[in-house]
Amino acid sequence: MHKHLLNIISQKGLLTEADSDLCKAYFEPVLLPKNRIVEQAGYIPQYLYFVVKGFMRIFHYNESGDEVTTHINCPPGFLTSYVHFINETKADENVECITECELLRITKSNLDQLTSKSAAFKDFSIEVFQLSIAYNENRSKELATLTAEQRYKKLIENYPAIIHHVPVQYIASFLGMKPESLSRIRKRMLS
């Protein structure tokens, strides 16, 4: 499982054998079933997850008690409640496996040790964090400026596998609409 992460990091720069060994020592491989909550609201997130295979989401409950999906991770990629993981504070959101997931996970203390021992991992961690900030800014902008149909089209263009693995209600919530609205958009696109 580690080879997926190592391949991505090696594309960004030179990885030594020592870096590879550190990755294997600090990232724990896990296989988790679908619908498993891996990080729960009200608790400090224990792990940063690298999704090798499968789909995960971040969600919270709004004031009406409805689930609101704020992030869907399509492999490969990292996922956790970042701000709470980094600051070691209680999260206000849940992290869930949508499908069965093959993951690599690392604790905050192990991530700190890894980045202090490996310049390649330190640089990569900074890049991942920067990409996360850029993604969130872009997502906020898209929710404010694109129509629901434009958001859906962009999602399936960038992540076509999502429609085969993620329930419609999660996709709709992520796109800021009701499932019925998404169904109408999908029907319209097929005609």
Image (tube, helix red, strand yellow):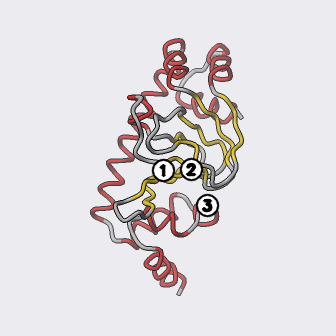
Q: Secondary structure at mark 1?
A: strand
**Where does label 3 land, which residue?**
161
Mark 1–mark 3 contact, CB under 8 Å?
Answer: no
Q: Which mark is residue 174?
A: none
Q: Secondary structure at mark 2?
A: strand
Q: CA–CA distance between discs 1 and 3? A: 18 Å
Q: Which mark is residue 58?
A: 1
Q: Which amino acid lies under the numbered mark 1 shown in the image of this protein?
A: Ile
Q: CA–CA distance between discs 1 and 2? A: 6 Å
Left or right: residue 34 versus residue 43 is right
Tell me which numbered mark, 2 or 3, is placed earlier along the sequence: 2
Image point (53%, 50%), residue name? 73
Left or right: residue 52 versus residue 169 is right
Image point (31%, 54%), residue name? 140
Q: Which mark is residue 96?
A: 2
Image point (49%, 48%), residue name? 94
On the image, which quarter does residue 84 sit in? Answer: top left
Of badges 1 and 3, nearer the viewer stands: 1
